[in-house]
Image: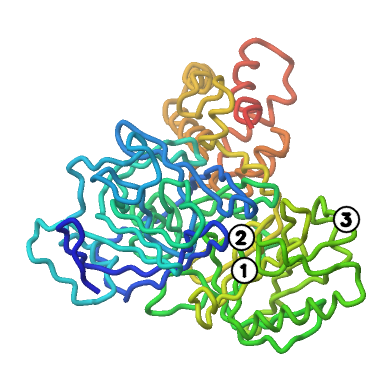
Amino acid sequence: MDFRSKGITLHSLFVSFLLFSAIFPLSFSAANQPHKVKNLATPRRLSSSAVFKVQGNVYPLGHYTVFFNIGHPPKFYDLDIDSGSDITWVQCDAPCKGCTKPRVQLYKPNHNLVQCVDQLCSEVHLSTDHNCASPDDQCDYEVEYADNGSSLGVLVRDHIAFQFTNGSVVHPKIAFGCGYDQKYSGSTSPPSTAGVLGLGNGRASILTQLHSLGLIRNVVGHCLSARGGGFLFFGDDPVPSSGIVWTSMVHSSSEKHYSSGPAELLFNGKTTKVKGLELIFDSGSSYTYFNSLAYQAVVNLVTDDLKGKQLTRATEDSSLPICWKGPKSFKSLSDIKKYFKPLAFSFTKTKNVQMQLPPEAYLIITKHGNVCLGILDGTEVGLESLNIIGDISLQDRMVIYDNEKIGWVSANCDKLPKYYSHEWLNEDSQRLAPYQDMELHKRKKCFKRYFDNAEVRRQVNIEFANFSNGREDFATVDSLRDRGKMDAKSWWIVHGAHAPTLQKIVLKLFGQPCSSSYEKLEYLLLYTFFKKK
C-alpha cells in the first residue's frame, strides 16, 4: 500500500494490531517477509543484561510503560511495552499531527535519518523488492493497528542509554521510528504515552539490534505485577536457572510476534471443546482475546458454572462486555475466587506443559465493585481467528522470549532483580557502579603490597576485574543472583573457583586476626560488592 503524506512517499507498510483504545487495548504485529542481513556480528560471549523498571497496570490504566533515555542531550520518553510488534517509535516534532505530548516533550531529529538504502530499512518493508529512487531517500515506515489506529513517520538513529547488570553504561546508536502522524480510533482518549517499545523478534527490533552489536544474548522478557509496575529486561541475566516452564515457539515467514501452540483450553482441570489454539503472547494487549468460537465456549462454561451462585449480570457496568455483581461490592480479586474456576492452556506438542490461569488471571474488579471477564472476543475487533494472551493472563510471572522457545515462571514482579540497574543506583546517591567506586580502585595498593611478583599481580588484577564487573564466569545467573542472597564467605566457596588466587586469599581472611591492612583487603574482597546489594 502506497500513499503520500506531507510530501513523503510511504515505502513500507508494517502491520501491527495494537489497539489504541484504552478500553480494549491489544497488539500484535504481522511481521515482514524474511530478509538476509549481512554482517550481523555474533560475539563469542554475551554476558550482561539491561533491566528497566515498568509502570502501569491492566485496570484502570490499560497499559504497562517503561522510560527510555534517548538522544544527546538525553531526554526521557515513556513507551508502551509491546511484545506484539518489533518497531519502536516515539512522537516526533517534524512537526507532528495527532501527537498527545507537548511539543517540548517530542523527539526532534537532528540530521540522523536512516537512509532508504540502509539494510535495516528493508526489514520494515513487507515486500522483498524494496527499491529506492535515490540513495539519499529517507526510510519511511507505517505501523497500522487493529482498531485502525496508526503511526506514520521516518526511521532515525540515536543514542539510547542502557545500564547493564555488570555495572557498565553504554549508549549505542539504535534505529527507531520518529512518528509525525498518529491516528487514533474509538470513543476513548488517545494513549498518554510518548510511543511504543516494540519487543518483537523482527530484525528491526531493539532486541535484535542490541544482540547484533554484541551487547546481549537474543533474549527479552518481562515481569508484570498484578499490583501495578514490574520490570522488563534485555538479555538473560535475570532468567532463573530452574523452575521455568518452556514451550516451543511457532514460526511464520510473515509474522514477527511470539506465538506457541497448538493448545487446548482446560476448565477446572477438565478438557473442553476448545482445542487447536495458536496463542500469541502480547504485552501490548491488556486483555486476553479468543476467536469468536473459543470465546463463546468460555463464556458458556463460566456462565453455566455460576448458576445457583450469588452473582447476577451487571449490565449497567460498561467497563468490559461481561460483568457480574455480588450481594455487596467486591473489594479485591480474593473476594471472588470462591465463585470462579481456574482455566489452563495445555500445549499438546509439548508433554506435560500447561499455563495455569487462576481466576485473577482472567478477571478484574472494576471501580463499581463488580467483577468482569477479562477474556474478550477477538473476532469482533478484527483479529479473525487469532488468539492473544494479554497482560491480564501474564501478571505475576516472568515471561521469557528466548529464540526458539517461550518460558514462564511464577515470580515476585514487585521487586527488581538485585543488579546494578539504573533504578537501583538512583535510589541512593551514595551508590556507585563498580567501575566508578574508588574503594574498589584501592585494590591496586593492596594487591601491590601482597603480591610482589608482577605476573601473579597481573593475574590477580584480571580475576578481580572479572569479579567486580560481573564478567566471564562471574556473569552466570547463579553467580550474580547469589551475590545478593549469600554471605560473602559462602559465595566465594561456591563461585570463587573462577578466581583461584582471590578465592584462596578470601578464605584465609576469615581465619586472620584483625589488622588495618587485612581489613582493607577484606573490605575489597568480602564486603564491598555484597553490602551494596
Mark 3 vs 1: CB contact within 8 A: no
Amino acid on which disc 2 is placed? Asp
Q: Residue at x 23, y 60 (%)?
A: 140
Q: Position of residue 261 (x, y in %)?
A: 58, 80
Q: Which mark is residue 391?
A: 2
Q: CA distance from mark 3 to mark 2?
A: 28 Å
Q: Nearer the viewer, mark 3 or mark 1?
A: 3
Q: Nearer the viewer, residue 21 or 8?
A: 21
Residue drawn at (68%, 24%), measured in percent from left and top? 509
Question: Which quadrant, please, contains the N terminus?
Answer: bottom left
Contact between marks 3 and 2 (CB within 8 A): the answer is no
Residue 282 position by quadrant: bottom right
Relative height, residue 68 to residue 150 (above, below): above
Query: Is residue 54 found left or right of 144 in the rendered image?
Result: right
- Which residue is denoted by mark 1 in the rendering? 288
Q: Amino acid at mark 1?
A: Thr
- Left or right of 16, for residue 138: left
Q: Residue at x 27, y 71 (%)?
A: 36
Residue beneath label 3, please?
A: 328
Helix, strand or loop status at disc 1: strand
Image coords of residue 464 (percent x, y): 51, 32
Residue at 56% x, 42% y is 53
Sequence-wise, the earlier of marks 3 and 2 is: 3
Q: Left or right: where does residue 216 sit relative to residue 488?
A: left
Where disc 3 sits, the SS reads loop
Spot occupied by residue 145 in the image (x, y as percentages of width and height)? 42, 66
Chain-order first, disc 3 or disc 1: 1
Say the numbered circle drawn on residue 477. Answer: none
Classify the position of the C terminus by image quarter: top right
* Other-residue count near label 1 (Cα within 10 Å), few / some / many at <14 / 14–19 / ≥20: many
Amino acid identity at mark 3: Lys
